[in-house]
Image (tube, rainbow, N blue to C red):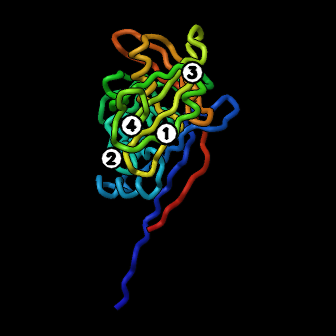
């Protein structure tokens, strides 16, 4: 008896989100344009773990902007760089993660989303006295928190003023999830929380050189913006 095995192909666009002005850096993002290839949470989580990006987005409805976000270990109702990247790729005015409707605009160079800080997962925001201190940090131990003495451990968003008058900040983000991502190159959710705490527009340099822009708006809404570029497209066949 002949048995026919039908292979299934999944196309994944790999983006870099929050790139520097010269197009370098940015946080890697996988976007599965056809979410039907992985219709259930378990298969999506498995693919996100296999890809190993800080986040992977599954597009369930490209016209309505319905998307589903996964890290290698957990599902997220909201995340900054996946929404900026997916909105840019799909050329949307509205994108809809589990957290709610997110409005989008582009200005030719940057893609901006409007979001609320309370949508962001918690990040301990730890201020340092200098950029040099932030740059010198080692990867913290996962899951320990920030003990007295400001020694960073576990999940932490470390930042310092680079130029306070100009709103320029140097930051590094350590998610502490134990999923293989020791340091995030660019973290939109933490940038939202820091903007809400400081109450002003920020120009953040994170990781090796990624750039994140923020601007507080009315009624608690914060704009989050950055450059996006398409790095490559992968095709996985099962």
Residue drawn where x is 47% and y is 63% of the image: 9
**At 34% across and 40% down in the image, what residue appears?**
144
Q: Residue 127 in the image: state x and y as whole percent.
A: 46, 22
Q: Residues within 10 Å of mark 3 (few under 14, many from 20)?
A: few
Label 4, label 1: how far apart the Cα atoms are: 11 Å
The residue where tag 4 is placed is 155
The numbered mark, 4 or 2, whose residue comes first in the sequence reads 2
Q: Position of residue 23 (x, y in %)?
A: 67, 35
Residue topped by disc 1: 184
Assign a secondary structure to mark 4. loop
Answer left or right for 144 relative to 161. Answer: left
**From the viewer's perspective, is residue 132 above or below residue 28?**
above
Tag 4–tag 2 contact (CB < 8 Å): no
Disc 4 to disc 3, how far (Cα)?
20 Å
Up the image or down, 30 lies above or below 22; here it is: below
* Mark 2, secondary structure of its residue: loop
Dot 4 or dot 1: first in sequence order is 4
């Amino acid at each position: 008896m002949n048995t026919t095995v039908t292979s299934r192909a999944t196309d994944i666009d790999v983006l870099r989100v929050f790139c520097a002005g010269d197009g370098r850096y940015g946080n890697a993002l996988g976007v599965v344009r056809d979410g039907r290839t992985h219709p259930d949470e378990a298969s999506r989580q498995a693919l996100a773990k296999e890809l190993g990006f800080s986040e992977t987005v599954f597009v369930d409805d490209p016209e309505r902007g319905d998307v589903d976000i996964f890290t290698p270990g957990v599902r997220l109702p909201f995340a900054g760089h996946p929404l900026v990247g997916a909105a840019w790729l799909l050329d949307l005015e509205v994108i809809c993660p589990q957290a709610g409707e997110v409005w989008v605009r582009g200005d030719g160079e940057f893609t901006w989303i409007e979001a609320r800080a309370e949508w962001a997962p918690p990040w301990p925001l730890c201020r340092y006295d200098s950029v040099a201190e932030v740059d010198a940090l080692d990867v913290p131990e996962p899951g320990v928190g920030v003990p007295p003495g400001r020694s960073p451990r576990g999940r932490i968003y470390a930042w310092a003023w680079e130029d306070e008058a100009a709103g320029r900040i140097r930051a590094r983000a350590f998610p502490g999830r134990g999923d293989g991502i020791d340091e995030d190159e660019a973290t939109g959710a933490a940038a939202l929380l820091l903007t809400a705490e400081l109450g002003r527009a920020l120009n953040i340099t994170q990781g090796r050189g990624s750039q994140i822009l923020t601007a507080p708006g009315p009624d608690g809404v914060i704009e989050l913006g950055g450059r996006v570029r398409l790095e490559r497209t992968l095709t996985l066949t099962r």
